[in-house]
Amino acid sequence: MGASRLIVAMPKGGSGKTATAVAFARGLERACKRVLLVDLDPQGSTTAALRADSSPGGYTACDLLLSPETPFAPLRVAPYLHLVPAPSQTIALEFEVQALNQLAGPVTVRAALERVASAYDYVICDCGPSLGAVTYNALAAGPILVPVETTRLTVSVLTRLTKVVAQLRGVAPGAFILGYLPTRYTAHQTESREALNALRTLGGRRVLRAVIPQSTAVARSLAEGVSLFDARYRASQAPAAYLAAIDEVVSRLEASHG
């Protein structure tokens, strides 16, 4: 059986998308699972967080998606964690993928991931904070994990995303929302509590039980290029919250393969 796919997407910045993609990759790698992390975000935040910027001419997501004849050459970040860095020519990638969409439908990302899946247990894609051609293709490769910052504005954005995913189901049965992950939760803030309640009302059983708290440890781990599960962050509640979220998502992935 090929790797389990997980598309981390949310068409709004500041929702903890990159933090979630990196934490999941680090958490699964910590459990000795073979993980491929693919950075499809034009900002390259995941690539930067892993301190793994590729050298000029190095293998990137552009090669993975558009050049199947190019030997697969991800960067080795840790013994069980590989990364396909973000491309340097993000505008060109959008245009190329959009052209392929018109010819064959949104299959570019799914086909690329299927070519390399046998070498991994999990393949995780971090998408950009938009619904451009690359993200649209990634959604079609589902299942999709949606990090949701617990603010009223962020929760209101979900309607657009769910409509897009529903439209994709006609051509991509794998496009479905596996779960909503509440992030940046602050229990003492009224807005955060109300947003979490609104998310649970809107998302029902799709909302994970795990809630990621607002935490300086998450920001520090990304800025310092260190795993959130490093001993220096043990005083934070965030690592345990992410491990609980990983357990939930893994169970859901296994059930979806069922």
Image: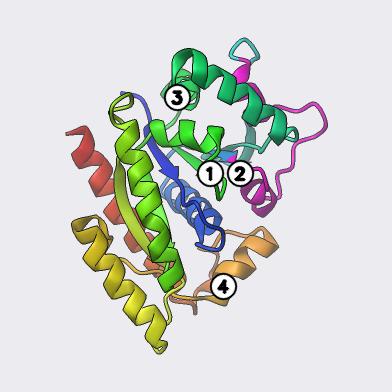
Residue lying at 55% horizontally and 38% vertically, measured from the top left:
132
Q: Which residue lies under the disc numbered 2? A: 41
Kind of residue at disc 2:
Asp
Q: Are marks 1 and 2 in contact (CB under 8 Å)?
A: yes
Element type where label 1 sits in the image: strand
Q: Which residue lies under the disc numbered 3? A: 106
Sequence-earlier tag: 3 or 2? 2
Can residue 39 be found in the magenta stretch?
no
Residue lying at 19% horizontally and 41% vertically, measured from the top left:
255
Residue 241 figure quarter: bottom left
Residue 251, percent from left and from top: 24, 48
Q: Residues within 10 Å of mark 4 (few under 14, many from 20)?
A: some
Q: Are marks 3 and 2 in contact (CB under 8 Å)?
A: no
Sequence-earlier tag: 4 or 3? 3
Range covered by the magenta-colored residues? 40-67
Sequence-earlier tag: 4 or 1? 1
What is the C-alpha distance between the residues marked 4 and 3?
A: 37 Å
Sequence-earlier tag: 3 or 1? 3
What is the C-alpha distance between the residues marked 2 and 4?
A: 22 Å
Q: Which residue lies under the disc numbered 1? A: 127
Residue 17, percent from left and from top: 51, 55
Q: Residue furthest top?
A: 69
Mark linked to residue 217: 4
Q: Residues within 10 Å of mark 1 (few under 14, many from 20)?
A: many
Kind of residue at disc 4:
Ala
What is the C-alpha distance between the residues marked 4 and 1?
A: 22 Å
Kind of residue at disc 3:
Pro
Residue 84 vertical position relative to residue 184 in the rendered view, above or below: above
Residue 161, percent from left and from top: 39, 48
